[in-house]
Image (cartoon, rainbow, N blue to C red):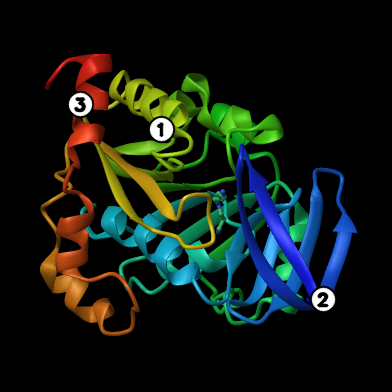
Amino acid sequence: MGIWFDETFKSSRFGLKVTRTLFSAQSPFQKVDIFETEELGRVMTLDDAFMTSEGDEFFYHELLTHPAMLTAKAPERVLVIGGGDGGTVREVLRHASVKKCVMIEIDELVVRACMEHLPTIGTAWKDPRLEVRFADGVDYVKHSDEEKYDVVLLDGTDPIGPGEVLFDLEFFRACKRMLKPHGVMALQSETPLLMSEAFFETQVKLRSLFSKVAPYLGPVPLYPSGLWSWTWCSDTQDPFAIDEARAKGIVDSLRWYNLDVHRGAFAQPNYVRRGIADRVGTR
Ligand code: SPD
């Protein structure tokens, strides 16, 4: 039988056969584990929930990053909240327009463990445009008086326990405060299937802050249900107005994202469309 690691989420369970434990420790914030698995290579869990795997991380990180980056106006300054495995900043730094990427991660142990054990995910740690700070992202966006950002990406954990604050209206308002007027924000917004209330409530909150809010969907086989969502927000930009010239320079190096995938991801399935309309009315 061997050893299995299962994530139990509500009354669902997804498991992977583990061949080796590479890292296991308790940080001041959470339990951090990194395993070797047969199917998806190295996998990180936080508090026993799957966060990323070598085998499927490209779905998540490419979809969190490129829709926002390619619909913002040649972004130079990018803020990433969370993202301790380094996958999101790796995708941000593919964009030649970026001069500065600040990543605010609360848990230094996660970054140190990922640097050592997940080097295929965090391939951009040494990029001179990247500044990693170990600090509370909520506190940063609420109180920082630093220069604003063209793109803000929220790569947090689930809205359960300590991660709940990352889905608060006041947190989203503070993130918007850190955006330039033409900025674009994107965040992971959970599974619209098994976490439908969190997904729909997030849509409602964001609609009270931004004039354009567009959820988009994609697969993340590692996460509960396998169907994941991200949400794109801006006051001025258009989620379908992709800067194709800039996209050309990067899509060949990607595994999931391309312009057709972008357009398809933003197509709204009926139950998502109805769920939003029921809560906020049609727009
Ligand atoms: N259910 C897991 C949701 C986790 C979202 N963040 C993952 C971090 C990957 N960089």
User: What residue is drawn where x is 25% and y is 34%?
Assistant: 272
Q: CA distance from mark 1 to mark 3?
A: 13 Å
Residue 184 x/y as whole percent: 30, 44
Residue 41, image quadrant: bottom right
Above-or-below relation of 124 to 49:
below
Q: Nearer the viewer, residue 109 or 130?
A: 109
Crowd tier of the residue under label 3, counting other residues whose Cα lies within 10 Å: few below 14, some 14–19, many 20 or above: some
Q: Which residue is mark 1?
A: 199
Q: Residues within 10 Å of mark 2 (few under 14, many from 20)?
A: some
Check if mark 2's residue and mark 3's residue have beta carbons within 8 Å: no
Viewer can see residue 26: yes
Marker disc for residue 274: 3
Return the x and y of residue 88 as percentages of the image width and height: 49, 62
Question: Looking at the picture, which amino acid does disc 1 mark?
Answer: Phe
Q: Residues within 10 Å of mark 1 (few under 14, many from 20)?
A: many
Q: Residue at x 59, y 70 (%)?
A: 53
**Is 209 left or right of 182, judged from the image as shown?**
right
Q: Are marks 2 and 1 in contact (CB under 8 Å)?
A: no
Q: CA distance from mark 2 to mark 3?
A: 45 Å
Q: Earlier in the sequence, mark 1 or mark 3?
A: 1
Which label belongs to residue 8?
none
- Identify the amino acid type marked 3: Arg
- The residue identified by callout 2 is 22
Which of the 4 image quadrants contains residue 36?
A: bottom right
Give the answer, above or below, for where 182 lies relative to 109.
above
